[in-house]
Amino acid sequence: MPVTDNSSLNDIKEVNLSYLMLAQRLLRENYAAGMFRLGFDSDVADIVLRLSPAQLVKLAGSSSLICGFRLNDYDLLSSLTQDVLGGVLQQAHSTILLAQRNVAQTA
């Protein structure tokens, strides 16, 4: 396997482990807010919370990213990248758009 492929796989495993550790921390600190930020339903959140350190490492060892990019809607992504509100309200605007998207996905 070429060095670049091995490096990419190691990077994916690192991202996976970081993501899983962050997910557990967010859920432990505030379950509801963690679920919202991660886009998890309660079943997934419960499973992630119950993962042991060994299970985290094993799951993180996948050659595929286990987290997904939730902004796969062109209109939503382009509206979030434009400075439509002078920067002052951009974060609030982003949160509202993402919250609406989460509600639409669960409906």
Image (tube, rainbow, N blue to C red):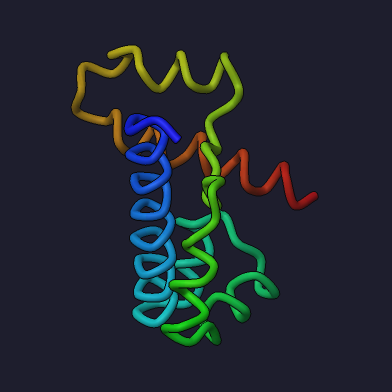
Q: Number of callouts in the render?
A: 0
Considering only vertical position in the picture, is 14 above or below 28?
A: above
Q: Quadrant of residue 43?
A: bottom right
Quadrant occupied by the N terminus: top left
Residue at image position (39%, 63%) is 17
Q: Quadrant of residue 5?
A: top left
Considering only vertical position in the picture, is 67 above or below 23?
A: above
Is residue 68 or residue 107 the one in the foreground?
68
Is residue 64 or residue 99 the one in the foreground?
64
Classify residue 89 as left or right of residue 45.
left
The percent coordinates of residue 52 (x first, y second) are: 48, 87
User: In this view, which residue lies farthest toward the right?
Assistant: 107
Considering only vertical position in the picture, is 88 above or below 55?
A: above
Residue at image position (56%, 46%) is 64
The percent coordinates of residue 90 (x first, y second) are: 29, 28
User: In this view, which residue lies farthest toward the front?
Assistant: 1
Residue at image position (46%, 14%) is 78
Residue at image position (62%, 39%) is 101
The percent coordinates of residue 20 (x first, y second) are: 43, 66
